[in-house]
Image (cartoon, rainbow, N blue to C red):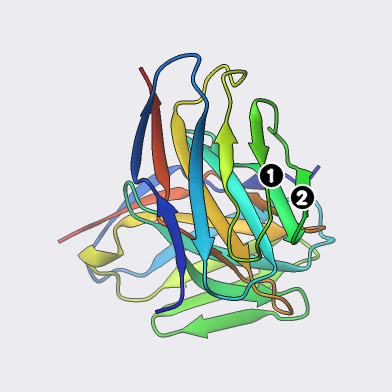
Amino acid sequence: KQEVTQIPAALSVPEGENLVLNCSFTDSAIYNLQWFRQDPGKGLTSLLLIQSSQREQTSGRLNASLDKSSGRSTLYIAASQPGDSATYLCAVRGNNRLAFGKGNQVVVIP
Amino acid sequence: DGGITQSPKYLFRKEGQNVTLSCEQNLNHDAMYWYRQDPGQGLRLIYYSQIVNDFQKGDIAEGYSVSREKKESFPLTVTSAQKNPTAFYLCASTIGGSNEQFFGPGTRLTVL
């Protein structure tokens, strides 16, 4: 069974610093990996999708990398802003379903 | 505007009652999913459906039922057999090809 881990559970950074969030997974036989953002009491917003054949994806200040062989993905958020405060979840796709990590709760301090 | 809608946003149920949560999408996605989110536990898959009139159990299907009579609709019924139904319920759908998954805004169910 695929296990997805995100450590630490919570972190805070000063505004302007780059954010680095890590995701590890136990089974490298994945189709893709997706990063989501969740605000309190809301649904999940898709940030980036990386297919298994790709090494990274970029969207604006966000960059996500994927190393399937080592079972790791990293989400970089450049020049963090208070509006980036949220929970970030990583999910890996196996056969017809996603396996989710528990998320990193991020606070960006003005 | 294309998207996934869930209703109601908040739902209160008395013990012993069945309740149905609505999920509708106008994205023309084939696959739809129901998840449950509890504090500190992450998202857990309840049921999913890849095509109309077909669905499969996820990891925690006991006490829940679904139907998929139309492509755009995937309602979830929480039955009285579900022992601890208080949670945040999220519906999602997936576009073919890339398999990117999109989520609705969620329904918070509280058992009184």
Q: Residue at x 57, y 16 (%)?
A: B83
Q: Is residue A44 visible?
A: no
- Tag of residue B47: 1
Check the image and report above or below for A19 versus A57. above
Quarter where residue B79 is shown = top right
Marks 2/1 same chain: yes
- Tag of residue B83: none
Q: Amino acid at mark 2?
A: Phe
Q: Amino acid at mark 1?
A: Tyr
Q: Quadrant of the N terminus of chain A?
A: top right
Task: Provide the chain ID for the residue under circle 1.
Answer: B
Check the image and report above or below for B82 versus B38. above
Task: Provide the chain ID for the residue under circle 2.
Answer: B
Of pointers 2 and 1, the one earlier in the residue sequence: 1
Check the image and report above or below for A83 versus A107. below
Front-most of A50 and B48? B48
- Tag of residue B55: 2
Q: Residue at x 60, y 53 (%)?
A: B74
Q: Residue furthest left?
A: A110
State the SS at label 2: strand
Q: Is residue A109 visible?
A: yes
Front-most of B106 and A101? B106
Front-most of A81 and B14? B14
State the SS at label 1: strand
Q: Are marks 2 and 1 in contact (CB under 8 Å)?
A: yes
